[in-house]
Amino acid sequence: MASPLRRLNADLWRYRWTLGPGLLCALVSALFTLFIPGLVREAIDAIPRMVAVQGYAAGSAAGTMLYDDFRWALVLLGGMILGLAALSGVFMFLMRRLVVVASRYIEYDLRNRLYAHLQRLSGAFYHRFPTGDVMTRATSDIEKVRRYVGPALMYLSRAIAAIVMALTFMLAISPTLTFWAVLPMPVLAVSVFFVSRLVHVRTDRQQKAYSGLTSRVQEALSGIRVVKAYAQEETWGKRIDDASEDYQARALDLALVDAAFRPVLMILIGLSTVLVVGVGGRLVIAGQLSLGNIAEFIIYVANLTWPVASFGYVVSMVQQASASMSRIEEILETEPAVGDPMADAAPDALAVEAVAGRITFDDVTFRYTPDGPPVLDGVSFEVPAGSSVGIVGRTGAGKSTLVELIPRLMDPTAGTVRVDGTDVREMPLRTLRAAVGYVPQEVFLFSDTIGNNIAFGVPEAEAEAIREAAREADLIGNVEGFPLGFETRVGERGITLSGGQKQRTAIARALIRRAPILLFDDALSAVDTRTEATILENLRAQFGQRTVLVVSHRVSAVQDADQILVLDDGRVSERGTHAELVAAGGAYATMVRKQQLEAELAGA
């Protein structure tokens, strides 16, 4: 099976002019570092010679001169060591500057690509993937992938360069001593193999536990008012504790593997040092090596410590990145349930075109799951452009589903939905949705100002247009009562506004678009009858100019529509004007009588 990280090859190639020089700097930095042990050998081997001439120097001008030469040679060697260390540091800085910057660019591209794909996915996807889980993949998992394309590649390239060059220098000095120095390395290779498998499995478990914890916290905070109202703080606190304990256990399990691996690395490196001193000492006694060579080898082994240790660290990061990339790929490989036929077309083909607003449902059936019951079953009707339609029915009759099919928030299981005679599946999504002003049943406001929430679909809207939309939605009086007016911030999900104010803000957001099709899905349920009457009066001014569909449980909201559809178990059971349906004496007439009675009792 191909590694999930192969998907990043195109990104790595795109930033090759940054990554390439950065990895080259890693090689140069390692090379300068590995010249230092040779200079140390020269310095140590010079010390016995200095001691030998020290006595001679006391009684001889030539000896004094020779001693001074040795002393200045040591100073020069010390300066060269400092210079090489400084050059290695400079190239290490350039390496980090280039590689880490490239990794940040790749992280930026990946996050934008994931977000753009999430925008294309339908509601069914978000039923399967909780918000907290998606957020974890878009943040924590992407960060783990970034550490692969940045630090992991950087450390790996420098480690390989350091190991190869160090072994080359060591072999040139003594193949025998090199053999004993690297003897523990096969044990290290086996350890890395087993640890990498453990890290991959434990990382996947940890990220899943983190997703569960994030989802729990997000749900608790979103529903905090319900939690408090039902005094369920302790119950939800226990649920968060359980999720936290699960994440803690998974994280500690992963940390245990990392913690156990590092001492193993240090023991193996220490064993190499012991072997160098023991075997190298025998070679010095035999006259095959100098004391400087032993010191040189010890420094080489010390220089191998971090590359070898970082190799294990890199393996851990690669395995974590692989697990995280698999989770990201799971989203990126999910095909949108609603495709855009013009997504890859030229920009001109995506321009918003004039839409008259004629809507046709032709034997439309919809199921949420292939084997589930039909929510809509063979629905057919036509709405002429510029006319109004009221849609009523019991809860679960399919009213909201019917409305959502028009802007293609979902696609029908069977049948066709047409706008101006064109199947909506053949229209560019941008064109179709720009022609629709939609007020969903569940109102959502962004944590922004009232003005910006109204102008959400028309960011370039001027202040007068925002004010006019607020007036039509009967919101202007409330807004003028706020100290900051339209600049008042509504808080997360509009928490500072009442239910009626939020609903009217959403209505204004739909009206300001001046779209040829207006869809109101039970958009007046949170307002009182007086406010409803005002909004409906303003809305009637739209009749004849726009196609308006109004879903409501209240007869008063639909009685002036050109036609009314009554849905029952996903089918159109009645249709006609208000007067025709009342005269027919069916379900609609029963609804009218019931609501009239409720109004009379409320008045009494």
Image: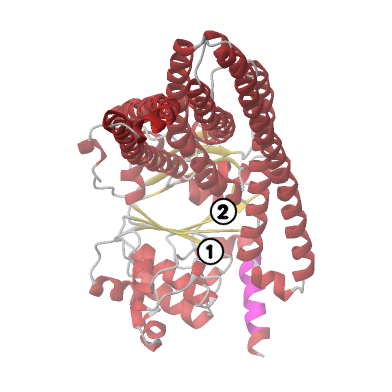
Q: Label for residue 399? A: 2
> Is label 2 in a helix, a strand or a loop?
helix
Depth check, front residue: 223 or 161: 161
Q: Nearer the viewer, residue 168 or 49?
A: 49
Q: Nearer the viewer, residue 330 or 285?
A: 285
Is residue 351 visible in this depiction of the protein? Answer: yes
Indicate left or right for 87 with 278 as reference. Answer: left
Query: Mark 1 is on which residue type?
Result: Asp
Q: Residue at x 25, y 46 (%)?
A: 352
Residue 182 appears in the rendering:
no
- Dominant secondary structure (helix, strand or loop) of the stretch shown in magenta: helix
Q: Is residue 142 covered in magenta?
A: no
Q: Is residue 569 above or below residue 316?
A: below
Q: Position of residue 294 (x, y in %)?
A: 53, 22
How far across and down, in percent of the image, does residue 572 sit? 58, 48
Relative to 315, does residue 279 appear above or below in the rendering?
above
Asked if residue 1 lies left or right of residue 502, the reply is right
Can you give x and y, in whole percent of width and height, for residue 460 in the image? 24, 62
Query: In this picture, which residue range is highlighted in magenta?
Result: 589-600
Task: Verify CB contact (< 8 Å) between mark 1 and mark 2.
Answer: yes
At x 55% / y 30%, what residue is drawn? 305
Residue position for label 1:
522
The amino acid type, in three-letter code, at marker 2 is Lys
Vertical relation: 387 (above or below) 254 = below
